Amino acid sequence: MLNIEELLATRRLILLGGKGGVGKTTMSSALAVLAASTGRKVLLVSTDPAHSLSDAFGRSIGDHITMLAPQLWALEIDPDKEADAYLERVLAQMRRYAGPDQINELQRHLQLSRQSPGAQEAALLERLAKVIEDGLQNYDTVILDTAPTGHTLRLLSLPEVMAAWTDGLLRHNKRSQHLSSVLKHLTPSRSIDSLTGDPNQHHSADLDDKDAELLNTLLRRQQLFNRTRRLLHDIEHTAFVFVLTPERLPILETERAVQALMSQDIPVAGLIVNRLLPPMDDSNFWAHRRQQQEKHMLDLHHRLPTLRRCLVSLQADDIVGLESLQMLGNHLISSSVGVTD
């Protein structure tokens, strides 16, 4: 069994992930409240654009650290706002390279890149790395409510990506040909932290101010991602926990996610299996649950009275294959409820 008390007592960074709708936010929030109740100073972070943390706690949180209870703070990172802020920083830096007649074209290209695949994630990953690092400096425990598998694997690859960009900058600067020895510090086998904290000591004498600024930006980001990568591999301080429901598709997705992390030697602490059915002979339990469900359905009707609804009962078996999918489709048709019902 997964020992939750031991997990909270021994791991400083806990990342919860899983398929959408399985209860990640609820479980993340519960773990954060539990950890705070033991006296640990806790930061709970979400990257869900739907602001589910606010819904879970019944109060507004937003993109600033908000105190929710003694020893408990929370932060909701908005991916769209993060992408906009990221592109503004890029534009501010690139203004030094562009003439006045090129600024409008540069802004147009950046706006187009805002819609390109990966632009939002690039901004989000950099913010996550900073939030994790700053959070561990100021809190006892950082709990991240996200879908960590893809994010984690990308965070692991970013130091090499940053090395490639820095390599390209140096190779294309004719005045920096003799600095090729520096490049070996940027390879995956060598830590960027082997450089001093001030990259200017190595490059400012050989690059003009604009190129040196750009190079230093790349080096600082690579240092950040290298530190994050080491932290994600640290089994003594970091734990990945997957939340899932006892259904076929969440189980399959969780299996693939666990295999992907383990293939990168990323520690997975265990699973939280949500929404297990209790013993069926508890008639009082089920009567109470039905009363609660009727109350929630009435509330839903009052909140969204004009929307049609489809009520799907709990199925007796997993939906697998064309026949089962067709039966479910028929069930969806027969279960559509008009607004006047």
Image (cartoon, helix red, strand yellow):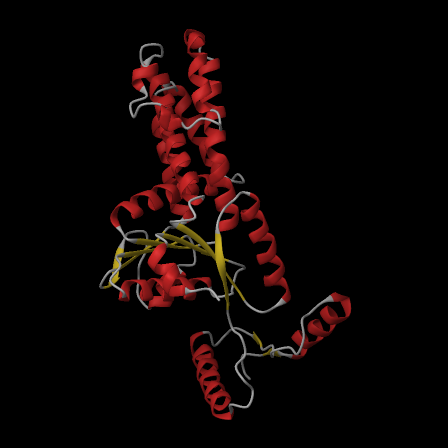
Q: Residue at x 35, y 10 (%)?
A: 206
The quarter of the picture where residue 19 lies is bottom right
Residue 261, given in percent of the width and then of the height, sits at: 54, 48
Q: Is residue 112 visible?
A: no
| Image: 192 above or below 35 | above
Residue 288, given in percent of the width and then of the height, sits at: 45, 88
| Image: 169 above or below 106 | above
The quarter of the picture where residue 41 lies is bottom left
- Looking at the image, residue 71 sits to the left or right of residue 146; the answer is left
Q: In the depicted view, which residue is nearer to us: 263 or 186?
A: 263
Residue 23, given in percent of the width and then of the height, sits at: 47, 66
Q: Residue at x 50, y 69 (%)?
A: 274
Residue 79, given in percent of the width and then of the height, sits at: 42, 48
Q: In the depicted view, which residue is nearer to us: 233 or 155?
A: 233
Q: Residue at x 42, y 62 (%)?
A: 25
Q: Is residue 280 visible?
A: yes
Q: Quadrant of the C terminus?
A: bottom right
Toward the right, the furthest residue is 323
